[in-house]
Image (spheres, rainbow, N blue to C red):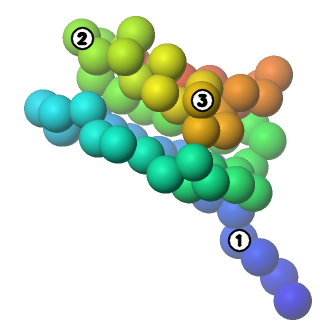
Amino acid sequence: MYEAKLYHVSGERRDLIPTIEENAFKGIHKKAKVKVSKKKLKSYRKILKGVGINGKKQKITK
């Protein structure tokens, strides 16, 4: 059976930084890009690296 993998995530329009489940990004594409707001990039980077966005080619951008 074919499984689609999440490739693009955007959290750009949020004022509050959400809490994210530990396995929320399990099985995400190895070249995934997560786009977040510029002023909260540092906070999101810390949270997302802890929940599975930590591959060499996975990026967290503004």
Residue type, mark 1 in image: Ala
Please state if 23 lies on the left or on the right of 62 as rendered. right
Residue 23 x, y percent position in the rendering: 62, 54
- 2 shown above or below 50: below
- 31 shown above or below 43: below
- 46 shown above or below 19: above
Residue that badge 3 annotates: 50
Residue 56 x, y percent position in the rendering: 81, 22
> Which residue is pictured at 28% across the width and 23% down the height?
37
Specify which label sits upstream in the sequence, 1 or 2: 1
Residue that badge 2 annotates: 39
> Which residue is pictured at 49% across the width and 19% down the height?
45
Label 2 to label 3: alpha-carbon separation: 19 Å
Label 1 to label 2: alpha-carbon separation: 31 Å
Estimate how packed mark 2 is, as few (under 14), some (14 to 19) or many (20 or more) residues with alpha carbons within 10 Å. few
State the residue lying farthest toward the right.
1
Q: Nearer the viewer, residue 34 or 26?
A: 26
Please state if 55 lies on the left or on the right of 26 as rendered. right
Specify which label sits upstream in the sequence, 2 or 3: 2
Specify which label sits upstream in the sequence, 3 or 1: 1
Name the mark nearer the viewer: 2 or 3: 3
| Quarter of the figure that contains the N terminus | bottom right
Estimate how packed mark 3 is, as few (under 14), some (14 to 19) or many (20 or more) residues with alpha carbons within 10 Å. some
Residue that badge 1 annotates: 4
Name the mark nearer the viewer: 1 or 2: 2
